[in-house]
């Protein structure tokens, strides 16, 4: 069980140190001088309770309380004061303080007040977890009828009950994060945190302290102790997305976490033991990175104890119709529209398309079509963006009636000329020997839009 993190705000150094002495054996303590400094630590989401010494505050104690509660209303705040004024106590409790303790007090009083609050923490994280699970159940469902994905589901089932590290590879948008969450939530760690960290999205100077935490004063700007992702995830799972972008010196530190289950915060020399499972993901070929010398091979082998490779959507075409209908359904409900259908012809076009952005691209397109469609009207082939329309296999032409085949031909012809002229409508009209306005009208009628980006 993770030790609760207590943040002490006291501008009097000797008071701060003596409070720390009472608490440090039982809790992780973070010491700061004043409330604004505390906000930095609170933003990391790892502080459970704040102690405010009202006698020694840079700003007024009640103001400090308000500041903390505004930053995170779930945090417990215990006020310490020597005035013992009932008015002050009532006002603190009204403003959301969990308790108010009058000085002098003995260590036992303080610890039991803190304990009463931390006992509710397990309960609260349970509630938070259930809420999260509810939301992932409704929008994090994985669907597939493809045999290759069925194999992936089997592996998820087998690996979820073990502490083994997993490496998930696959193009962008193939469902890597969804798989990682599934592994976590089917296993015994499900009540514990799932901490996702995208190595590609964090500047490398900040990455080390984000992952491993830092001590107060470890570097300029380190005002307070910070608990890193690995420490916060203790007992649970760390999901390292885009792991190929992890800088060398952190690859070494990660390797140690995997081998010894321990690490140090930046600026500290006491090792911290953790029990975590690491699931890494990459959309580039890590083996190639290893050959280039950009990724450590020992780390690579540690991470890929169980490898899961997600096939791109174009290699599991049998999933396209299923997923398209599922996303139409999901987004129709979300937009409060009657469930919008999709024509067989349109489905055929979707199946013929290459989907470079995989499932995410399909979902985004379905959402856009729902938003732009009229209530209850079926989505037809004309509603699809030109890039996908182009993908309609030619043989479907023969399955259409004369009018529809003509529309398809006109559409393909016009898009072809426009693409050739770089969407210069004047030039395209000249080539087609029709008036510009006729071209505009045709484009409108056939729902031809210039592809963006
Ligand atoms: N099999 C599936 N069934 C239903 N939804 C899916 C499936 N696979 C992916 N999705 C959805 O597609 C979107 C992209 O999935 P996810 O974020 O897991 O992909 P990713 O591989 O992590 O992408 P990236 O490499 O871009 O981070 C999500 O909204 C996810 O819910
Ligand atoms: Mg992802």
Image (tube, grey):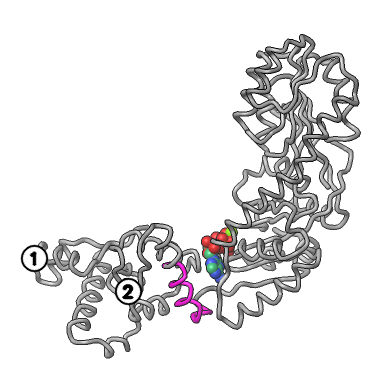
Above or below, 114 against 277 in this view is: above
Instruction: Give coordinates of residue 300: x percent, y percent.
Output: 75, 64
For residue 394, say whether it is visible: yes
Q: Nearer the viewer, residue 306 or 119?
A: 119
The verdict on label 2 being within 8 Å of ligand 1 is no
Q: Main secondary structure of the magenta part?
A: helix
> What residue would you read off at disc 2?
389
Above or below, 393 against 276 in this view is: below
For residue 297, say whether it is visible: no
Tell me the quarter of the image containing the C terminus.
Answer: bottom left
Instruction: Give coordinates of residue 124: x percent, y percent.
Output: 71, 44
The verdict on label 1 being within 8 Å of ligand 1 is no
Q: Viewed as shown, does residue 388 lie left or right of 422?
A: right
> What residue would you read off at disc 1?
435
Inspect the magenta stretch and tell me whether residue 318 lies in it.
Answer: yes
Report crowding for label 1: few under 14, some 14 to 19, many 20 or more residues within 10 A (C-alpha): few
Q: Quadrant of residue 191?
A: bottom right
Q: Secondary structure at mark 1?
A: loop
| Highlighted magenta segment, given as a residue range | 315-328
């Amino acid at each position: 069980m993770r030790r609760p993190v207590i943040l002490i705000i006291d501008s009097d150094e000797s008071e701060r140190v003596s409070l720390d002495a009472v608490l440090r054996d039982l809790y992780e303590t973070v010491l700061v001088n004043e409330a604004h400094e505390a906000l930095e630590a609170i933003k990391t989401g790892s502080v459970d309770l704040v102690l405010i010494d009202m006698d020694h505050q840079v700003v007024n104690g009640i103001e400090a309380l308000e500041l903390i509660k505004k930053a995170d209303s779930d945090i417990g705040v215990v006020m310490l004061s020597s005035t013992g004024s009932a008015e002050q106590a009532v006002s603190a409790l009204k403003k959301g303080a969990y308790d108010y303790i009058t000085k002098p007090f003995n260590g036992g009083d303080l610890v039991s007040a803190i304990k009463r609050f931390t006992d509710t923490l397990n309960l609260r994280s349970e509630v938070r977890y259930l809420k999260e699970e509810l939301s992932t159940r409704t929008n994090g469902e994985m669907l597939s009828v493809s045999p290759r994905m069925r194999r992936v589901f089997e592996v998820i089932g087998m690996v979820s009950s073990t502490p083994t590290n997993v490496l998930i590879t696959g193009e962008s948008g193939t469902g890597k994060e969804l798989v990682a969450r599934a592994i976590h939530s089917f296993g015994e760690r499900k009540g514990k945190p799932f901490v996702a960290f995208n190595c590609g999205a964090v500047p490398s100077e900040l990455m080390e302290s984000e992952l491993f935490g830092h001590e107060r004063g470890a570097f300029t700007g380190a005002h307070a102790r910070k608990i890193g992702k690995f420490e916060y995830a203790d007992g649970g799972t760390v999901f390292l997305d885009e792991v190929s972008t992890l800088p060398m010196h952190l690859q070494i530190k990660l390797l140690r976490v995997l081998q010894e289950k321990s690490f140090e915060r930046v600026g500290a020399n006491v090792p911290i033991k953790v029990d975590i499972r690491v699931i890494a993901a990459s959309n580039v070929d890590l083996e190639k990175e290893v050959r280039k010398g950009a990724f450590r091979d020992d780390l690579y082998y540690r991470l890929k104890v169980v490898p899961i490779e997600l096939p791109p959507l174009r290699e599991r075409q049998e999933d396209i119709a299923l997923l398209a209908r599922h996303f139409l359904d999901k987004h129709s409900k979300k937009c409060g529209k009657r469930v919008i259908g999709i024509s067989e012809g349109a489905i055929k076009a979707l199946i013929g398309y290459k989907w470079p952005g995989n499932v995410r691209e399909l979902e985004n397109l379905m959402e856009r079509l729902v938003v732009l469609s009229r209530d209850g009207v079926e989505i037809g082939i004309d509603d699809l963006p030109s890039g996908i329309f182009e993908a309609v296999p030619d043989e479907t032409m023969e399955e259409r009636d004369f009018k529809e085949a003509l529309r398809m031909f006109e559409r393909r012809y016009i898009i072809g000329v426009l693409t050739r002229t770089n969407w210069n409508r004047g030039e395209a009209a000249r080539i087609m020997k029709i008036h510009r306005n006729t071209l505009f009208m045709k484009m409108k009628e056939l729902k031809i839009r210039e592809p963006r980006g």
